[in-house]
């Protein structure tokens, strides 16, 4: 999926590919994503359902709806309070899953919402949240990741949404929008296959390439590489969603 936004010259894309293991077992894609670039506030969001939970795909889908509701929560020029907004998001998520076994809906949550001067970027659980910033003419790009993989957790464990809000497990930042060049959100089906020393160059190369391509070309290229993932033995669902600023 590819959309162009006319607000602040933002562009973006998203795509998802079900993993070979889920295909063989006849299971649904447990990832979900959404992007909104045509109206304010613009946003991207992504979620990865835990493979051990039977309804985690429903939890992931509920994340995208909850973030859309959160984005419509007007701050009316007041100071953005990330923890309060994360709590509101969590309550929206519970409402979206009314009547469903929450324990079986465990999933990660990553999102970025652009509110004029400030952009709230938040992450719970694994995957990559890559933030690219620059000065106003687009030079001197800097790359940082909102969180690193938690080595204290076992390989098949991650922080996730569940029956209680665990605010201390969230990572978040308020990024001045004027400095934001791009934000990439990816599930661990992609992130875990990227060597640490190549992560930064992977996202910067996508950004530099896609800024000069037309929307249809970007969509085609993302579909090509996400459906032909080259890592031998990969099995997980793979999802990416991103927004980036288009400079003249």
Image (cartoon, rainbow, N blue to C red):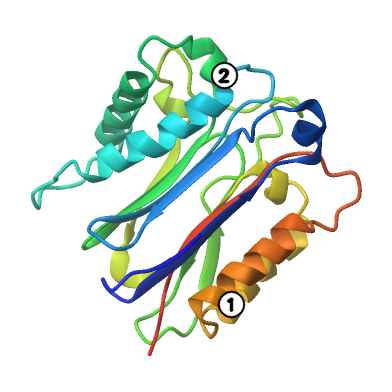
Image x and y of residue 72, in percent:
20, 44
Proximity of marks 2 and 1: CB atoms separated by less than 8 Å: no
Give the total of numbered labels.
Answer: 2
Give the quarter of the image for residue 145: bottom right
Left or right of 178 in this view: 109: right
- Which residue is painted at 71% across and 65% down in the image? 224
Q: Is residue 207 visible?
A: no
Density class for disc 2 (Cα within 10 Å; few <14, some 14-19, many ≥20) is: many
Is label 1 in a helix, a strand or a loop? helix
- Which residue is painted at 44% across and 27% down in the image? 168
Residue 55 numbered mark, or none: 2
Density class for disc 1 (Cα within 10 Å; few <14, some 14-19, many ≥20) is: few
Q: CA distance from mark 2 to mark 1?
A: 35 Å
Sequence-earlier tag: 2 or 1: 2
Image x and y of residue 103, in percent:
53, 11
Image quarter (top left, top right, bottom left or bottom right) of the C terminus: bottom left
- Which residue is painted at 74% across and 56% down in the image? 227
Q: Is residue 178 visible?
A: yes
Q: Is residue 218 above or below residue 235?
A: below
- Name the residue carrying label 1: 217
Image x and y of residue 243, in percent:
44, 64
Residue 19 numbered mark, or none: none
């Amino acid at each position: 999926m590819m959309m162009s936004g006319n607000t602040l010259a933002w562009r973006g894309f998203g795509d998802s590919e079900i993993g070979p293991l889920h295909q063989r077992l006849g299971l649904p894609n447990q990832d979900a994503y959404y992007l909104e670039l045509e109206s304010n506030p613009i946003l991207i969001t992504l979620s990865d359902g835990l493979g051990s939970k039977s309804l985690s795909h429903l939890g992931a889908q509920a994340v995208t709806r909850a973030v859309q509701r959160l984005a419509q929560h007007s701050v009316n020029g007041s100071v953005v309070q990330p923890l309060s907004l994360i709590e509101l998001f969590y309550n929206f998520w519970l409402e979206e899953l009314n009547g469903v076994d929450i324990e079986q809906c465990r999933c990660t949550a990553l999102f970025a919402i652009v509110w004029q001067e400030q952009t709230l970027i938040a992450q719970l659980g694994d995957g990559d949240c890559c933030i690219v910033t620059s000065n106003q003419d687009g030079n001197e790009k800097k790359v940082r990741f909102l969180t690193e993989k938690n080595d204290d957790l076992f390989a098949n464990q991650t922080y996730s949404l569940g029956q209680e809000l665990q605010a201390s497990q969230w990572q978040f930042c308020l990024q001045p929008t004027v400095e934001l060049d791009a934000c990439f959100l990816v599930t661990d089906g992609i992130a875990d296959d990227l060597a640490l020393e190549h992560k930064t160059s992977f996202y910067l190369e996508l950004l530099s390439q896609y800024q000069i391509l037309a929307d249809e070309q970007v969509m085609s290229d993302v579909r090509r590489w996400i459906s032909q993932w080259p890592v031998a033995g990969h099995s997980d669902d793979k999802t990416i969603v991103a927004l980036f600023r288009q400079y003249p």
